[in-house]
Image (cartoon, helix red, strand yellow):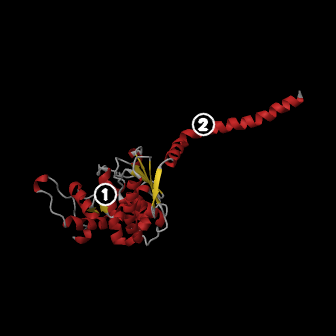
Amino acid sequence: MTVNASGERGFSKPLAVILLCLASIAVALPFFGGTLRQFVRESLMQRVTSSHYEILCPPNALSQDEMTEFATRREHLFTALDKKLGDSGSNMEIRIIFDPAFSVQAANAVGVEPYTVAETTIRTKLIGRNPQLPAAADAEALLYVGWGQPGNAQIARWIAAWFAGNSDSTELGMAAAQVEQRLGHKKVESLLGDPGGEISSPKDQSLLGSAWVSAIAEFGGLDAVKKLYAAKMAHPNIADVTKALGTTPLELDRKWQMWMYAYIAGMPPAPSDSGMQMDMPMPEGNR
């Protein structure tokens, strides 16, 4: 009897371990199941590589020639962006995953562009057989390599858009001035958090935010942009931004207003019958 009882106890221990492992898997599956499915899905994708890119998409979604052509065109963009960073990303590889099943809603958690950037991996939706991806996505991946982990994802997205340079083939400052003509001038606090709901369109807010980064660069140089990039904040806010840049809200608004006013002054006036009026008083120091 003693031998049998000991054998039963010996058998129950590995059984308990197995049951505990199964229970742990059952608990973890809802949290990691999506990641596991994504890993398996992407592992089965077809791919092509170039000097600085690995391009993936589901089998037959694009031909190898179409993927190679995209990678070749992207190399020119990489060279231009990397030159701005002093060639700090020359040995890196950017992975771009085109997926017809990509969730645009997930991408819109930060900014308004239909892509996500996780370190040097970019995921975006493939529509048809003509892969499209904004240059700011590559810029965001390059900035991660050159400057490290950003302090805030939204600020990093604005900096990447500024770094890429243009907005829908329009110079960034002019594109922002067109938004300014429609909305009137918005203070930095509104750009960061829009507490009063003054900027209803996320796209407008993103464009103005990128233009504001351009103003930071013009007045403070690249070092100021780096400080903004590295500033850790759960949500963009005027207090953390002014602390990171070593300035005051008043000075931050004054320089932003001066920068934007220079672009507005060079634009043709809005039609007189449009009913739009520019809320653009000159800074106190310039009166």
User: Which of pointers 2 and 1 lies earlier in the amino acid sequence?
Assistant: 2
- Callout 1 secondary element: helix
Residue 64 position in % (x across, y down): 42, 53
Q: Which residue is mark 2?
A: 26
Q: In this orientation, does residue 105 appear?
A: yes
Mark seen at residue 207? 1
Three-letter code for the amino acid on which mark 1 is drawn: Leu
Q: Are marks 2 and 1 in contact (CB under 8 Å)?
A: no
The residue at 19%/67% (across/down) is 266
Q: Position of residue 272 (x, y in %)?
A: 11, 56
Q: Quadrant of the N terminus?
A: top right
Determine whether 47 is above or below 85 in the image.
above
Disc sitting over residue 172 in the figure? none
**Secondary structure beneath label 2:** helix
Disc 2 residue crowd, few under 14, some 14–19, many 20+, Cα 10 Å: few
Q: Is residue 158 visible?
A: no
